Image: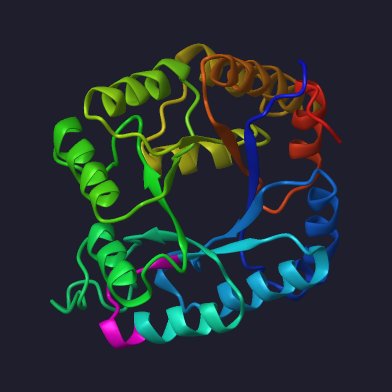
Amino acid sequence: MAAHPAQFSFELFPPRTPEGVAKLPGIAAALAALKPKYFSVTYGAGGSDQDGTYDTVVKVVESTGIEAAPHLTCVGSSRARIAALLDRYKAAGVKRIVALRGDLPATAIGTGAPGDFHYASELLSFIRQTHGDSFQLEVAAYPEMHPQARSPEADFEAFRRKVDAGADAAITQYFYVADAYFDFLERCAKAHITIPVIAGIMPITNHAQLTRFSAACGADIPRWVRLRLEQLQDDKAALQDFGLDVVSRLCETVLKGGAPGIHFYTLNQVEPTLRLWKQLGLPA
């Protein structure tokens, strides 16, 4: 596949173990060699604190010289806490934020105290009110519907509210059905939503992990793919080769179909993304 003018970026997560911390600089360096537009750094799983995100953002920027965008989640947080985090990121030179609702911390579930923010759109409005255009704001999009949404219409309306609140671009949940992504773009066009909607793509490397993640986030695994993965689950090399073929065709399809870019969910693994990058013929 020929070089494409699209934008490419990579997601990392804050390491959870000393071994992960030690490996992160090498992972970031290998991916940085591909010259992505930016890295994003997720928020701690289960609503844990933001320190790991902040530390990872700083380390990635220092070690690679490439922009890093923290995921900033708001549910369960106070305005004062979010304001302090924004000031901290601004002082660190952060120019881009992935603004998300997030999951309520496990310790707060059932307490009746969800904090000052209920939706990502409220977080975006707060950032714009307090910091103007200081940050490029990325938001999440769900081509196959957020698993907690009442309906596709309600989910799309929530997305529209984020756009109206000041989103500059969107990154989709990962998907394996290209038509779901194209349908979402068509819905955006009909609603006169013009911000870029970047395709979120996750390499396929592990059957059990993919099944678990997809059940949690509502991403559909096509039946033929699922059956082949089940068949190959005890042959790691064959499964990864099959996954590479599936995901590379998906990337080619969305790029040819007009996707403005791809955001790769790397899961802090270099090799699957590098193989996919090479298969697509993207510039190295």
Is 30 rendered above or below residue 200? Answer: below
* Quadrant (top left, top right, bottom left, bottom right) of the N terminus: top right
**Residue displayed at 73% across by 68% down:** 61
Image check: 158 left or right of 9?
left
> For residue 181, what is the image quadrant?
top left
Residue 188 point in image, percent of width and height: 29, 29
Residue 148 can be seen in this image: no
Question: What number of labels is visible?
Answer: 0
Eyeballing the image, is 100 above or below 271? Answer: below
Residue, far front = 133
Residue 224 is situated, as x and y percent measured from the top left of the image, at 51, 11
Q: In this orientation, does residue 257 appear?
A: yes
| 146 shown above or below 225 | below
The C terminus, quarter of image: top right
Give the image quarter of residue 227: top right
Residue range corresponding to the magenta coloring: 72-81
Left or right: where 173 falls relative to 150 = right
| Residue appearing at x 44%, y 81% in the figure | 85
- The residue located at (40%, 60%) in the rendering is 99
Near-viewer residue (209 or 182): 182
User: Viewed as shown, does residue 105 lie left or right of 85?
Assistant: left
217, above or below 113, in the image: above
The location of residue 235, given as percent across then percent down, is 76, 26
Q: Is residue 201 magenta?
A: no
Between 187 and 205, the one lying in front of the other is 187
* Image quadrant in which you'd find residue 128: bottom left
Q: Which of 35 and 23 is in front in this view?
A: 35
Q: Which of 250 and 9 is in front in this view?
A: 9
Q: Which residue is drawn at 35% across and 31% down?
A: 143
Q: Left or right? Give the position of 238 relative to 212.
A: right
